Image: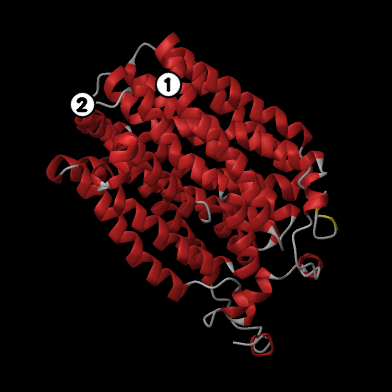
Amino acid sequence: MSNSAKSVNQSERPTRIRWTIVGWLTLVMMLTYLDRLNLSIAGKYIQDEFSISTQTMGWVFSAFLLGYALFQIPGGWAGDRFGARNLLTIAIVWWSAFTALTALAPNLILARWFGVAGSLMIVRFLVGVGESSSSPNANKIVGHWMGSAHRATGSSFTLMGIGLSGALTPSVIAWIMQRWGWRASFMACGAIGILFAIVFHIFVTDRPEEHSLVNASELAIIRKSQASEARAKSGLSQAPWGKILASPSVWALLIGYFCQGYPIYIFHTWFFIYLVRVKGLSISQGGIWGATPYLAIALLAPLGGRFSDAAANRIGKKRGRRVAVWVGMLASAMLLWIGSGATNKWLAISLLAAAGGFNIFAAVTFWGACIDMTQEFTASLSGLMNTFGNLGGWVSPILTAYIATHFGWERALDFAAVVTVASAVCWCFVDASVSFDGGMGESS
């Protein structure tokens, strides 16, 4: 439908397709974490079957993160260049196929050359390459579909998908593995992803103007800030990397997200095994309690988005975004510190779960800030930021295993709390009110 057609009948009741779109993006992120977390649940079975040590398993976990981190920038650039919807569709098919191949990794010829652990590392690296396009391009679509006053709220839906998937994945994957083995869980995840990619491509568009069900009234709500829309159409064909990389604000954002990624990836990799081996939970109990950080994320991500947008609209993007990160990260650090030393295992698990939730409460603002700083090249900046976040995530399972092995799990979690505080400190130097599409943001 053309823009001229949509300029008619603006008095009609606005449609709400933008919320359907962010719902689809939530499902995308749920799928990414289904295929990301399944290995952390299957890890115990794989370790036992192939006699893989804890530290070697840390390298297997991190292989995904390395591929995921290294291809964030190419994935974001490609989304800005060729369209986020197309990139996401291709990416979903790619990572779903390699997720299914994880089940066969011990029997591939790679296992003869590099051993079972090496074969798993290579396949998981390629899963990470596929998933690298997901977050930058989902954020790109959020930037087009959500008005300037609701950017963090829109981004929070994608992060809420992490919580919803994380809450469901441990129980579902543990249930499948107990009945049909760990290999069946990877085959099932791959099949679900390929079917989802087809449906996603049919129902989602890059921009609201391209969607046949969006009426003029809803489009007016999305585009009500004409000044912001004019800035977004700057006419640049490539991201202004010189300006972006010369900005101290951007570097503070990148380092802050590196520090955000380190603690959250403890939940994505070691938490289930920590519950079973350290806290003494059964496999079924681990599946249930392993979901608690993700329940906290599902609850606190949308609250973080609304808090961030409300603070930015009230006291300006520069101060408002900072306050939102400080609240989330400092609360997360405190809960990690207290939870690591709690003697009651149920209290300890609950405190650690809340720490994960508050980490994502703050992380929502990082993604909203990427849209604030450049709406036209959101995917490129988001990919750059997520590269740093997942390099932190890549280090996390390796360093956590080393600290836990040599100094104990309490010290490993205390160190994660210190890194979380560092993420909050970085935001003393982030200014989300400056736009690289041309000048200042809507509210400084």
Image color mode: secondary structure
Q: Residues within 10 Å of mark 1 (few under 14, many from 20)?
A: many
Would you name the residue on which mark 1 appears?
401
Q: Is residue 219 above or below residue 137?
A: below
Q: Amino acid at mark 2?
A: Ser
Residue 442's x, y, as percent?
A: 80, 57
> Horizontally, is 55 left or right of 49 in the view?
right
Q: Residue at x 57, y 36 (%)?
A: 391
**Which residue sits furthest right?**
439
Task: Give the residue pinned by disc 2.
Answer: 282
User: Residue 252: x, y in percent?
Assistant: 73, 36
Q: Is residue 317 left or right of residue 438?
A: left
Residue shown at the point (66%, 34%) measured from the top left: 256
Q: Residue at x 27, y 47 (%)?
A: 108
Seen from this angle, which residue lies furthest left? 179
Q: Amino acid at mark 1?
A: Ala
Residue 407 left/right relative to 439: left
**Which percent across, then down, holds residue 405?**
40, 14
Camera-nearest residue between 300 and 25: 25
Q: Nearer the viewer, residue 423 or 347?
A: 423
For image coordinates 79% across by 42% down, the residue present is 431
Q: Nearer the viewer, mark 1 or mark 2?
A: 1
